[in-house]
Amino acid sequence: DLQEGESPGDMESPVDGEQAQELQKILDEERVTPMFNVNILVGLFVVILAMNLLKGGGAFPSPIGIECGSQSFWIANGLMLGWIFAITLYGRAYLVKRFEAKQRVGYKYVEGDIQWDGRATIVYPAICCLAGFFAGMFGVGGGIVKGPLMLAMGIHPKVASASSACMILFTSFTATTSFFVFGLLDEQYAPVCFGIGFIATYFGQIGLSILMKRAQRNSYIAFSIGGVVLLSAILMSIQSVLSLAEGEHHKSGGICGKDS
């Protein structure tokens, strides 16, 4: 029986010595954490965080004198988007090159692996961009959207859960700095919500780990992700209905502060 990602050619074609060495190199690299890729991700995060603080906002004056709403302010935002786009193009080129190398040496994919070909490296990032856009629009965490997306892609539940948590670490931190510089961060709510989130995450992770060790079922991760998404949708719907019934009107803070 063929595994996912295999073809009859992979099974029948002999692998020469050079291809065998390349295949072994790929296998050795995938047994350890790719620190170069991690460093690129951290570099992307650090640059975006630094530029976000340097350009300032309505409630946080720029250390280098950039005025909110000025031409230099929008240039700084454009540079951030350009940096993100450049790293995205590099990541896509790396993944496609690695996919082609795996195809060349007859690499056998296992269940849960993603074949990052030319199409996948466009479709999945585009979906993630839409997920992040709507997550920011409706005030929910991007991981709530990307977790189910990765499960739908066939990724192992443990990998999907860990990847979502990693993405939330970076995206939530940068989003917090954006709210801070624009004066939209409620200093009374922030420490309370941080404490509740940290404690709930800690005990939730411990409880789920114990449950999975006893039951030996990865489906609990998928059920927990689905339950969080469902609960979020219900609570957001209730809050929206209550706000409409009470006639609440929330004033926008504006791009350059609370009163702009």
Image (cartoon, grey):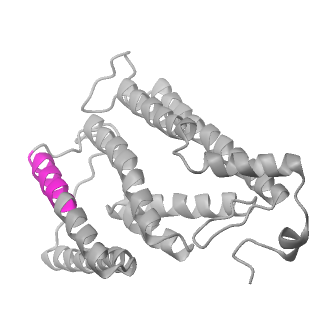
Q: In which quarter of the image is the N terminus?
A: bottom right
Q: Is residue 8 above or below residue 248?
A: below
Give the overall secondary structure of the magenta segment.
Answer: helix
Residue 119 sits in quarter = bottom right
Q: Which residue lies furthest to the top in this view?
A: 64
* Residue 28 showing in the rendered view: yes
Residue 93: x percent and y percent? Answer: 72, 45
Q: Quadrant of the C terminus?
A: top left
Q: Is residue 241 above or below residue 165?
A: below
Picture mark count: 0
Residue sitting at x 84%, y 56%? 104
Q: Image check: 131 left or right of 186? A: right
**The one of 73 and 95 positioned closer to us in this rendering:** 95
Q: Does the magenta stretch include residue 197?
A: yes
* Residue 69 showing in the rendered view: no
Q: In this view, does 118 lie above or below 70?
A: below
Q: Residue furthest front?
A: 17
**The one of 157 and 21 positioned closer to us in this rendering:** 21
Q: Image check: 28 left or right of 228? A: right
Q: What stretch is highlighted in magenta?
A: 188-201
Residue 210 sits in quarter = bottom left
Residue sitting at x 68%, y 57%? 121
**The one of 242 and 236 positioned closer to us in this rendering:** 236
**The one of 185 and 171 positioned closer to us in this rendering:** 171
Residue 226: x percent and y percent? Answer: 36, 78
Residue sitting at x 40%, y 59%? 162
Residue 40: x percent and y percent? Answer: 54, 36
Residue 148: x percent and y percent? Answer: 45, 73
Residue sitting at x 20%, y 74%? 239
